[in-house]
Image (cartoon, rainbow, N blue to C red):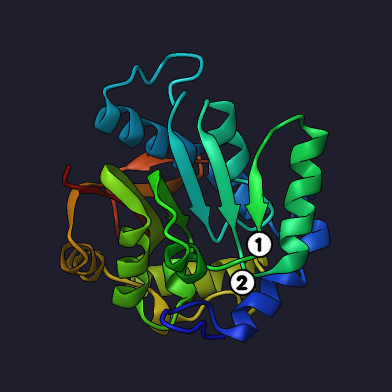
Amino acid sequence: MRQAGGVSLDADEVARFDALASRWWDLGGPMKPLHRFNPARVGIFRDAITARFGRDAQAMRPLDGLTLLDVGCGAGVLAEPLARLGATVSGADPAPELIAVAAAHADDQALSIDYRATTAEALLEAGEVYDVVVASEVVEHVNDVPGFVRTLSGLVKPGGLLLLSTINRTLAAHALVIVGAEYVLRWLPKGTHSYDKFVRPEELRAACEAAGLEPTDMRGIKFDPLRNAWRESGDTLVNYTLAAAKAD
């Protein structure tokens, strides 16, 4: 799928995730790995945002007063905890059934989140900007990573922050994410990921720099089998996050 003047997800990618809409919030369903992964990325993103804006990460609502856009928000698994941290959150996803599920779930949780079935390109064309833009587990599903990052950069206010999380293009990632998670353990539906679309950290850094952003922090996220949980790590061989700031 392409939108005029920009890059968006493939139609097959959108349809694949849209088909999972009804089970997105099923903690034991096909999105179970995403729910287990979520606390680690929320913690990393919270810390990056509070560091950028001079907030206390341990405050009850450290993101109060900040506007945040979650691009490729799915059914709101990341948007909801960021809203609970105080941010004024908008969520964008081109899959309409996912947006409907996200809106209904937020309503059930008494959370005010502005969900829209749209693309980052459409929001950029409309002139929207935010203090923080997040695209988590999205860049590995787009056709043109540098073009997509340029679009995201255009949505970030001067002085703001872009937060990304994705999968490194390594043999370890292929073994763990595709062979292990999709085919052996069946944590994810087969075909969720394509190895060729995984993005190496140096490629993502270069895309951010070309888009006028300064990469400021990179963190790994690793599964800890002893704790049976994901945690922040210095190991970026498989999953990693990148924070990139826009100058004032």
Residue 171 seen anywhere in this rendered image of the structure: yes
- Residue under label 1: 187
Question: Which residue occupies 47% across, 63% down?
Answer: 126
Closer to the chain start, of discs 1 and 2, is 2
Q: Residue furthest front?
A: 126
Given residues 34 and 65, the one toward you in this image is: 65
Question: Which residue occupies 36% across, 67% down?
Answer: 151
**What is the quadrant of residue 58 in the picture?**
top left
Q: Is residue 189 left or right of residue 92?
A: right
Q: Is residue 74 left or right of residue 131?
A: right
Residue 143, percent from left and from top: 43, 83
Question: Which secondary structure lies at badge 1?
Answer: loop
Does the residue at mark 1 contact the one at mark 2 (Cβ under 8 Å)? yes
Say which mark, if any, is on residue 202: none
- Residue under label 2: 182
- What amino acid type is highlighted by mark number 1? Trp
Question: Which residue occupies 55% across, 83% down?
Answer: 10
> On screen, 33 above or below 176?
above
> On screen, 227 above or below 176?
above
Question: Which residue occupies 58% across, 66% down?
Answer: 181
- Gap between marks 1 and 2 measured at Cα: 6 Å
Question: Which secondary structure lies at badge 2?
Answer: helix
| Quadrant where the image shows the N terminus | bottom right
- What amino acid type is highlighted by mark number 2? Glu
> On screen, 225 above or below 54?
below
Q: Is residue 45 left or right of residue 213?
A: right
